[in-house]
């Protein structure tokens, strides 16, 4: 057993407090949030049943994904008209430049805080 595998394998939960499995080796009946979502489910308020762990090759940092029980998962709530309206309003706000107030086809980068045209004014002058 390799060192990385041994560090990530703790099915009893003694070392980390919850059962821990190496990446891609979760037992049947447990799934991550993304796997639940792909199946049309959500955790539904249940507690974490375990975790997947892997060590990055370059830095050796731990990457963790929590596992939930599939049998306790609930169906995803359907989108209502009010939720769709709120989603559309949020997306318009993300695409509207605060400087020029023009709605763009892309989301405004948060690092810059302005659209591409406002961030590079010298390109407009040419």
Image: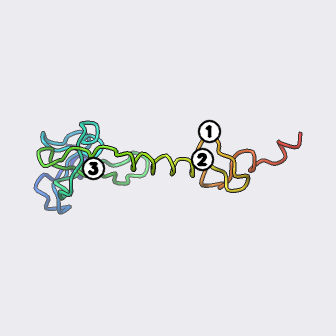
- The residue furthest top is 39
- Picture disc at residue 105: 1
* Gap in angstroms between the C-alphas marked 1 and 2: 7 Å
User: Which residue carries the number 2 mark?
Assistant: 95
Q: Residues within 10 Å of mark 2 (few under 14, many from 20)?
A: many
Residues at discs 1 and 3 in contact (Cβ within 8 Å): no
* Gap in angstroms between the C-alphas marked 1 and 3: 38 Å
User: Which residue carries the number 3 mark?
Assistant: 53
Q: Residues within 10 Å of mark 1 (few under 14, many from 20)?
A: few
- Picture disc at residue 31: none
Q: Secondary structure at mark 2?
A: helix
Q: Residue 84: which quarter of the image?
A: top left
* Gap in angstroms between the C-alphas marked 3 and 2: 36 Å
Badge nearest the viewer, 3 or 2: 2
Left-right relation of 57 to 12: right
Q: Is residue 12 above or below residue 24?
A: below
Q: Secondary structure at mark 1?
A: loop
């Amino acid at each position: 057993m390799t060192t990385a595998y041994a560090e990530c394998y703790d099915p009893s939960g003694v070392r980390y407090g919850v059962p821990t499995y190496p990446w891609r080796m979760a037992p049947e009946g447990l799934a991550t949030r993304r796997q639940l979502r792909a199946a049309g489910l959500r955790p539904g308020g249940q507690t974490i049943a375990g975790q997947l762990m892997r060590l990055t090759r370059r830095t050796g940092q731990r990457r963790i994904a929590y596992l939930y029980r599939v049998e306790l998962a609930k169906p995803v709530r359907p989108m209502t008209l009010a939720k769709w309206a709120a989603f559309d309003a949020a997306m318009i706000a993300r695409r509207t430049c605060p400087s020029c107030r023009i709605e763009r086809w892309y989301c405004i980068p948060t690092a810059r805080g302005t659209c591409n045209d406002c961030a590079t004014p010298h390109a407009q002058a040419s």
